[in-house]
Amino acid sequence: MILKPPPTDIQNLYLESIRAIGIKLSEHDIRFEEDNWESPTLGAWGIGWQVLLDGLEITQFTYFQQCGGIDLDPVSVELTYGLDRIAAYLQNVDNVFDLRWSRDRRYGQVRLAEEQQFSSYSFDYANPEITRELFDLHEREAKLLLESFDHASEEAKRRFPILAAYDQCLKCSHLFNVLDSRGVISVTERVSLIGRVRQIACRIARDYLLQHSVASPVAQGNAAEVNA
């Protein structure tokens, strides 16, 4: 959930949302523990807390400061609710796969095989050589799209598929995680791959603002600041 700009009483509103879900605050220990968030590959970071319910994190509460390498104005609040963990409290179960998915199905019946198979793939079966090639291909496609945007006319910029470049960037980020899970990248290479994804993400954020400034005069000031 994104709130932009954030209400002045956002913490109280958040606590009320937890109460509305069904958690009786008077019966549990709700604690805000400092836990600043960062995504190096996407050039995003913020300050905030992890919210603990009886010692278990159920929400990340972040004041977003930057995204795609661009300072946010106004700063926004992002609330990420751990619905499976909250549901475990509400349904009084210890194993997430025992959660009720519907009247006659458990969460494990719907998602356990998927979790097991994709975890197995990421940690044991993903071919490192092919995964690196896929990373390079998606990176190349993203760069080609961004280069095309830079040389496009103003009219073409309005309808240019910037989101397609973003999709390629997300695929690079995912493939980086797979390589990391396989344990096949060194500390030095890890920094290099993160930098490559971050470079694309920041270019996309810049071009996204430029695209909207072409269509909206109100956004031109922001685009000019990014170019500067």
Image (tube, grey):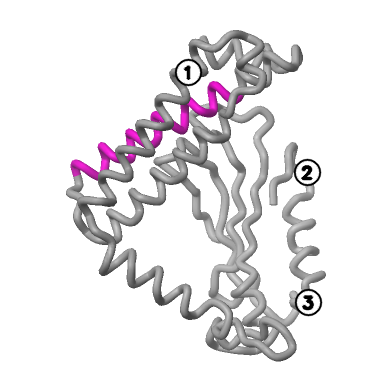
Q: Which residue is labeled 3 in the image? A: 22
Query: How many marks do you count on the picture?
Result: 3
Residue occupying the point 51% across, 40% down? 167
Count neighbours of disc 2 (C-alpha within 10 A) and say few if under 14, some if 14 to 19, many if 20 or more.
few
In magenta stretch: residue 194: yes
Question: x and y percent of residue 165 in the render?
Answer: 50, 33
Q: Is most of the magenta stretch helix, strand or loop?
A: helix
Instruction: Name which residue type carries label 1.
Output: Ser
Residue 160, label in figure: none
Q: Which residue is labeled 2 in the image? A: 8
Magenta span: 188-208
Count neighbours of disc 1 (C-alpha within 10 A) and say few if under 14, some if 14 to 19, many if 20 or more.
some
Residue occupying the point 61% across, 16% down? 157
Image quadrant in which you'd find residue 94: bottom right
Please give left or right for residue 181 compared with residue 38 in the image. Answer: left
In this rendering, the label closer to the viewer, 2 or 1: 1
Real-space Cα separation, disc 2 to disc 1, in angstroms: 43 Å
Secondary structure beneath label 3: loop
In this rendering, the label closer to the viewer, 2 or 3: 3
* Mark 1 vs 3, N-terminal side: 3
Against 185, residue 111 (above or below) is below
In magenta stretch: residue 13: no
Question: x and y percent of residue 21 in the render?
Answer: 77, 72
Q: Which residue is labeled 1 in the image? A: 148
Residue occupying the point 40% across, 41% down? 40
